[in-house]
Amino acid sequence: MMTRLQRKNNPAALRLRLLDCAAQLIVEHGLPALTLDGVAREAGVSKGGLLHHYSSKDALIGGLFEMVVDWFGGQVEAAIDPDETRPARFSRAYLQVIAQIDMSVPSEKRLAVLILMLSSDPHFCARWTSWVEAQLREHQATDQSPVARCMRLAADGLWLSDLGGGPDSVATVRHEILQFLETLGTGRQS
């Protein structure tokens, strides 16, 4: 006779839920508000259940960082132009992905979490830099020009402006900036 409800064991789904709850707490209340108790409560699991998957707060934050970078990297990979000779191939995709991020969409708020982590922890800055450097090595034939560098730096600035709701985040201004960036390297700048 069964005396308690049995549930399907799905560790991958639980890890994802834990990471989503951690991201939500950070986005809504800042990185200092992230606690293991808070994440466990939001995810509806015991603290011991959380610790089974992430042995510490640092491990949880590391898992969150990896999830966000994987998501972002997948988006960039999908946006890369199939023409392997197009100038600034990776940088254009990087810009395109950042330009299409909608901070009002919960799944895309994960990028806000990444920015918060990058701005507050040198360890994550170094890991992000390693990811970008790996992409640039892979696309060295097309993405070593000053134009490519400018596109990536402008995309990073756009990202930060969007995160803070800056004056350049207004749709009309943003569109104008993106149109200009798309013309870089084509000789059609005005």
Image (tube, rainbow, N blue to C red):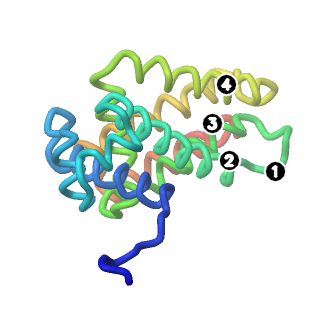
**Of label 3 and label 2, which has the lower sequence position?**
2
Where on the picture, by quarter, is residue 168?
top left
* Residue in the image at 27% along x and 23% along y: 120
- How much space separates mark 1 and mark 4, taking CA atoms? 19 Å
145 or 77, which is in the foreground? 77
- Say which amino acid is labelled 4: Ala
Nearer-the-camera pick, 190 or 138: 138
Instruction: Judge by depth and name the residue closer to the eye, 180 or 4.
Output: 4
Which circle, 3 or 2, is nearer the viewer? 2
Q: CA distance from mark 2 to mark 1?
A: 10 Å
State yes or no: discs 1 and 4 in contact (Cβ < 8 Å).
no
Choose mark 1 or mark 4, whichever is in front: 4
* Circle on res. 91: 3
The residue under the point 29% across, 32% down is 57
- Could you say which quadrant of the image residue 188 lies in? top right
Q: Quadrant of the C terminus?
A: top right
Q: Which residue is mark 4?
A: 134
- Name the foreground residue: 137 vs 160: 137
Q: Residues within 10 Å of mark 2 (few under 14, many from 20)?
A: some
Q: Amino acid at mark 1?
A: Pro
Which comes before the other along the chain, label 2 or label 1? 2
Q: For the N terminus, which image quadrant?
A: bottom left
Q: Amino acid at mark 3?
A: Ser
- Provide the secondary structure element on which disc 1 rests: loop
Reading the image, the residue beneath label 2 is 77
